[in-house]
Image (cartoon, rainbow, N blue to C red):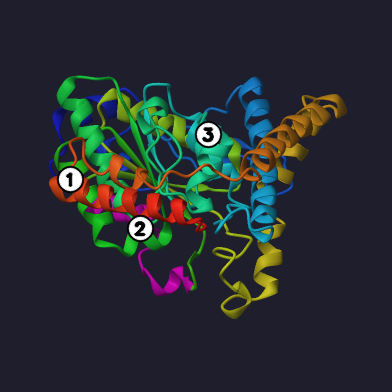
Amino acid sequence: MTIPAEAQEAVKRFGISIEDYMLPVHGQIQILSEDGTMLPEDQRGSSPGHQYPVPSDNELLEAYRQLVIGRRVNDQNSALVRQGRLAVYPSSHGQEACQVAAALCLREGDWMFPTYRDSVAVMTRGVDPVETMTLFRGDWHGGYDPHAHKVGIQSTPLTTQLLHAVGVAHAAKLRGEDTVVLAMCGDGATSEGDFHEALNFAAVFHLPVVFFVQNNQYAISVPLVHQSVAPSLAHKAVGYGMAGERVDGNDIVALLAVLDRAVTLARSGSGPLLVEANTYRMQAHTNADDATRYRNQAEVEAWAAKDPLNRMRHYLRSTGHLTDDVETAFAGDAEDVAQRLRDGLGTEPSLDPQDLFRHVFAEPTPQLREQATFLAEEISRDEQSGKEL
């Protein structure tokens, strides 16, 4: 396998051989046990050259605060669907650690390309909660300015966002920018052709992309065992000439450590990397799905015991950094976001039918102008006759 010289130099700075760098470490990276205690270093899944320093106490407290907000966002949005304020919501309940770590590992100038299930990551990145949810109320646009936040519009088609991510990374490299792109997808996306095209292009052109696969065990109703027989999804990376890592997706300490290292490597010139996070979708695929038809309650309960929020709470409580006052303050922050969602999504939007034509092309075509004029005349006639629009 031919590894670009710049990648070899970047890897050497971390004291890793190319052979060790390319293949995932044995097992998966985990720093906190399921009961929230810190694992000894020899039990964390790391190996020589693959070391993951524990983030600072301040970083972990902020991560926990975002976890609390993320869980409240998931619960609030699910309620808004039942109230008819949202058309659909793909909950990330149980996956909040992946969501928060994805946003916190990036610098301000880096880009994130999320999926439809990554609303919590988008909000953690700094996008207004109501703007984030505009897409899911059935509006005609994505709700926020991607360029202002360096966040792509949440993608409903599987995996198309990975191609967009690779394109942005390629453009940034051509311009000489110090930019890393985080490209998010789920386990089901790894069965799509766009996944393979994106990874191959990123590797061939040696682009600073971190592909972050949230393996929540199901592609809607299809379990992972019916999608791939590879030892792990992280092992797919080596076939494209990039490194792959596996991490406990419910351990936010490990997630921050692994993703921070991946972003640092990519920024240092190592080329693209793939990180697989093993987690679980606790709720249905969306509000239109009945998860009881394809998975049993015992499986759900087993994963409930690995809840990322409880794990982090127990750890921070044991270290004394999470007090009752801090917990109350974080809960207040979460409720503030929930209130903003209720207020923003409880207000009927003001719609202008001419928006159908304004934002299709920078310079409207003759056909669009004709259609816009026709619609305006129809509306005018209806208003004059007293018909409701």
- Mark 3 crowdedness (10 Å alpha carbons): few <14, some 14-19, many ≥20: many
Cβ atoms under marks 3 and 2 closer than 8 Å: no
Camera-nearest label, 3 or 1: 1
The residue positioned 24% from the left and 52% from the top of the image is: 371
Cβ atoms under marks 3 and 1 closer than 8 Å: no
Three-letter code for the amino acid on which mark 2 is drawn = Pro
Three-letter code for the amino acid on which mark 3 is drawn = Leu
Visible residue check, residue 108: yes
Q: For the residue labelled by badge 2, is the local secondary structure a helix, a strand or a loop?
A: loop
Residue 50 locus on image (x, y percent): 42, 35
Q: Which residue is mark 2?
A: 157
- Mark 1 crowdedness (10 Å alpha carbons): few <14, some 14-19, many ≥20: some
Magenta residues (range) = 222-240
Q: Which residue is mark 3?
A: 256
Q: Is residue 225 magenta?
A: yes
Q: Which residue is mark 1?
A: 201
